[in-house]
Amino acid sequence: MKWRWLILFLLTFFSLEAEPGEALIVPPLREGRLRSDGVREYTVTASEGELEFFSGIPVPTMGYDGDYLGPTLHLRQGERVSIRVRNSLRETTTVHWHGAYLPAEADGGPRQPIGPGETWIAEFTVNQPAASLWYHPHRMGTTAEQVYRGLAGMMIVTDPSGPAGLPDEYGIDDIPLVLQERRFSRDGGFRYEPRMPDIIHGYGGNVLLTNGGIEPVFRAQTRLLRLRLLNGSNSTILRLSLPEGPEFIQIASDGGLLSRPVPLKTLVLSPGERAEVILDLREQQGRNTVLQAESSFGAVYTALLVNPGDELRNNGELPSRLASLPAAEIPRAAGRRSFVMSTMGPGGSLTINGRRMDMARVDERVAAMSTEVWEVSTAGMMMNTPHNFHVHGLQFRIIDINGDPPPPELSGFKDTVLLWPGDRVRLLMEFGEYPGIYMYHCHLLEHEDAGMMGQYEVLD
Ligand code: C2O
Ligand code: CU
Ligand code: CU
């Protein structure tokens, strides 16, 4: 219902004729290099590039180790990693490891800028459950444009102690899908030129890119197909479905596996959120399955065509139990804070608790290893604007949404939660051991750049 309500505010863009049918691009998997000191080392370089999304029309882009998007980094639970980031852009950037538990100085937020020509090294020990995370720039005020132009990549954490039976052959039955709505002009160009309404409503578009391609085809060879879905759009909320296909079986949310598989007809992802789903293709042999994506700006896209072969290999059975998650219970001594996300705060801007982001101001101070309840709500004159709330440096649990317990697909570990206009959510925050300053913000990137962000400091 809320979805329909939002559609009333859709912006209408003309549509471009896509040339569907190209094979899905699967970003290369980076295993890193294990050094003699036991640290696994990776290198990624941010640079400018050029890509023809529509043939014959080259568009200036940005990418990590390529023209658009970046490699998938494979991290292993328990290992120490060192990621070298080279900046070959002509402007300052940062690289933030979204969803990772790590020391503040390795977080890659606005406090860790990398100037043109510089190299920055993030070092940390992987200490979190298996999950689909991602990385992207986070420069103060220009995050949206750098992500828009192509700087983003997936980061997969694996843990051998997880349940058996889940598809895990990267590129074969375990596929990352970076979904991004983009706005192309009539000449096939691709510019980031937000105006005032785009800052309030977000920079919607008229083309959906799936791993940088348009309506790509994936040829499935197995009965079970695992998709690691990321909404990498700037401000577009996506509602995904399989109109003629099987149900989604969601197995993981942002921070890792759910306690058990959750069958779903539709899946809503706001910017920055991830979901891992299994498609059971047994009944789909010989016919295309369409992954449909409906944009909060009104467009309906084919995100992917899954083309199952006639002989699908049996690649296991889905386990009925995935993870044992602790109950999201509020300890007696838990501190409480509230956060109001407002679209028209004092001064006509986008604020949290009436304030715009200021790098020189720490908004909240929390104790290391403590637990708190954070209540997040929305307000403002522009009541039609949804937001989401993302926190760096930890994975939280949703206690309730408008007073009701979360549905099973939102009951696991999360780092980003969607708030429709008027929503109120309570989050169980368990702070970690690393002292330092981390961000919380709306992940609608136009809102974030406009100042809908704050800083919290973990105190020793
Ligand atoms: Cu995905 Cu503050 O970031
Ligand atoms: Cu983040
Ligand atoms: Cu917002």
Image (cartoon, helix red, strand yellow):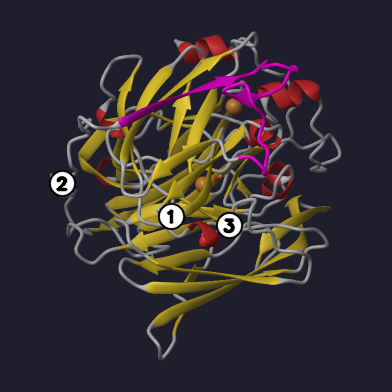
Q: Are marks 3 and 1 in contact (CB under 8 Å)?
A: no
Q: Is residue 326 visible?
A: yes
Residue bearing mark 1: 100
Q: Name which residue type carries label 2.
A: Ser
Say whether residue 426 is left or right of residue 209. left
Q: Are marks 2 and 3 in contact (CB under 8 Å)?
A: no
Q: Quadrant of the N terminus?
A: top left
Asked if the magenta segment contains residue 340, the reply would be yes
Write down the quadrant of residue 199 in the picture.
Answer: top right
Residue bearing mark 2: 324
Q: Name which residue type carries label 1.
A: Ala
**Location of residue 167 with respect to 375 vertically, above or below:** below
Mark 1 element type: loop
Of residue 422 and residue 363, the one placed in the foreground of this image is 363
Residue 151 percent across, percent down from the top left: 65, 54
Point out the quarter of the image occupied by ligand 3: top right
Q: Nearer the viewer, mark 2 or mark 3?
A: 3
Q: Is mark 3 within 8 Å of ligand 2?
A: no
Q: CA distance from mark 3 to mark 1?
A: 11 Å
Residue 315 percent across, percent down from the top left: 23, 59
Question: Which sits earlier in the primary sequence, circle 1 or circle 2?
Answer: 1
Residue bearing mark 3: 108
Disc 1: CA contacts within 10 A as few (<14), some (14-19) or many (>=20): many
Say whether residue 213 is left or right of residue 142. left
Q: CA distance from mark 2 to mark 3?
A: 31 Å
Of residue 169 and residue 35, the one placed in the foreground of this image is 35
